Image (cartoon, rainbow, N blue to C red):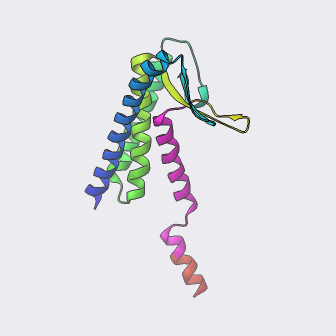
Amino acid sequence: MTQHVRWLGTSIAVVILIADLSTKATMIPYLTESGGLVELLPFVDLRLGYNRGVSFGLLSSNSEWAPWALAFIAFIVSAYLAMRLWRATYKHDAIWAGLIIGGALGNAIDRLIDGVVTDFIDIHVLGFHWPTFNLADIAIVLGLAIVMLKGMRPSEKQIVANQDTIG
């Protein structure tokens, strides 16, 4: 079972990484030729943006070392999660680890190549405008959501303990 779980997480990471880098490579020339903006739906645009920081521009810097430092951190986090994935026995652990690893590596590689992370998905609803993001960001958020949902669920030991006190 553990080998299947490893394969699942690794496959997810590779698919996310390839999809993220491919969409960025496609969107840069397409959106540049389109003036940087394509309206898809009343609440979704494709808008070319570049992020020098991490999520929502935090830790943004014009330093020549910033892209390297942020990419290094992403590689360290990915290596740690890869070790967790290697020991995973449950599918949900492989899924969240694969999502986060693929997303983190996609943004880190983009940052090393261009010095910035390319964003292109722009959501705006009822006057609320979410910061522009990319597929790697979606994968990271989904992976973190799985971790949080898993953390809110009682463990098997807690369930057994509750059954013992009830019964």
Residue ID at (48%, 16%): 32
Residue 84 place in picture, x, y as percent: 38, 48
* Residue 75 appears in view: no
Residue reaching furthest to the right: 127
Left or right of 115 in this view: 125: right
The picture quadrant where one finds residue 2 is bottom left
Q: How many marks?
A: 0
Quadrant the C terminus occupies: bottom right
* Residue 70 appears in view: yes
Q: Is residue 4 above or below residue 45?
A: below
Q: Is residue 147 above or below residue 15?
A: below
Residue ID at (42%, 18%): 29
Residue 143 place in picture, x, y as percent: 48, 47
Magenta stretch: dominant SS? helix
Residue reaching furthest to the bottom: 167
Q: Nearer the viewer, residue 124 or 136?
A: 124
The magenta region covers 133-159
Q: Nearer the viewer, residue 110 or 160?
A: 110
Is residue 147 on the magenta stretch?
A: yes
Residue 71 place in picture, x, y as percent: 44, 25
Q: Nearer the viewer, residue 77 or 106?
A: 106
Residue ID at (28%, 50%): 7
Quadrant the N terminus occupies: bottom left
Is residue 78 on the magenta stretch?
A: no
Residue ID at (53%, 12%): 63
Left or right of 65 in this view: 55: right
The picture quadrant where one finds residue 17 is top left
